[in-house]
Amino acid sequence: AQSVTQPDIHITVSEGASLELRCNYSYGATPYLFWYVQSPGQGLQLLLKYFSGDTLVQGIKGFEAEFKRSQSSFNLRKPSVHWSDAAEYFCAVGAGQAGTALIFGKGTTLSVSS
Amino acid sequence: EAGVAQSPRYKIIEKRQSVAFWCNPISGHATLYWYQQILGQGPKLLIQFQNNGVVDDSQLPKDRFSAERLKGVDSTLKIQPAKLEDSAVYLCASSLDSLSGTSSYEQYFGPGTRLTVT
């Protein structure tokens, strides 16, 4: 069965510092991978996605993620964090064909200190 | 382009009462999903519709939850009777399917309905 693990429940980063959020997935074939962000009281907003091709994908708000098949990972990175990046981040995998439901990790809460 | 609309945004009910949530997906999106997000966890699929047909309802507690999408557009999710453990955010999402049958990988989420069962 497919699964997603986000090892870090809560991370605090200083404003201007770099960020890396970890995501590991379990799936036999090449998965479709996503990162979503959720601000308090808001729905989920797609940051970026990986389907195939270049393993380094760029997203919105200056985020990027790298797919590493050998490590079953899809870590999210940002070179310089802004206070407005404080939110909850979810990694998700879509298995099988397009249009199938997503399986989400439990999320990582990002706090940004000044 | 209007996003996925959900109502109400918040609902507080007592256990054993019933409640209904409404979702209007993005225009033209054939696939609609209902997810349940319990505090501290990621969203979990409850049911998936393709037009007005059910694709996957394997994780829907059918003894108390029901959902419909009669005309292939709006959808309603109902809980009757509610239990304390149903307290969660209920998220609706939609994705585009072309007439050729090619689905979109990208799902668009509504703001969710926060349900508190007391």
Image (spheres, coloured by chain):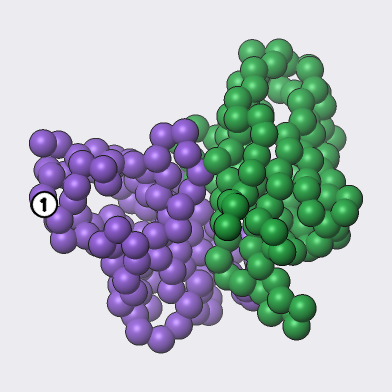
Foreground residue, B112 or A26? B112
Q: Is residue A22 above or below residue A30?
A: above
Residue B7 in the figure: left or right of residue B100: left
Report the residue at 40% width, 50% height from top.
A37
Residue A109 in the figure: left or right of residue A112: right
Examine the rendering and report whether any part of residue B33 can be seen: no
Residue A22 in the figure: left or right of residue B106: left
Which residue is identified by label 1?
A17
x and y, in percent, of residue A51 in the image: 48, 77
Amino acid under disc 1: Ala
Determine the image quadrant of residue A75.
Answer: bottom left
Which residue is most to the right? Answer: B70
Quadrant where the N terminus of chain A is found in the figure: bottom right
x and y, in percent, of residue B32 in the image: 71, 56
Q: Is residue B65 above or below residue B100?
A: above
Foreground residue, A1 or B30? B30
Number of numbered tags placed on the structure image: 1
Determine the image quadrant of residue B29.
Answer: bottom right
Quadrant where the C terminus of chain A is found in the figure: top left
Report the residue at 73% width, 51% height from top.
B47
Q: Is residue B29 above or below residue B41?
A: below
Report the residue at 55% width, 66% height from top.
B106
Foreground residue, B42 or A77? A77
Tint applied to chain B in the drawing: green
In which chain is the residue bearing label 1?
A
Report the residue at 19% width, 55% height from top.
A19
Residue B44 in the figure: left or right of residue B49: left
Q: Is residue A40 above or below residue A85?
A: above
x and y, in percent, of residue B104 in the image: 61, 72
* Label 1 neighbour load within 10 Å: few <14, some 14-19, many 20+: few
Q: Which chain is purple?
A: A
Examine the rendering and report whether any part of residue B10 can be seen: yes
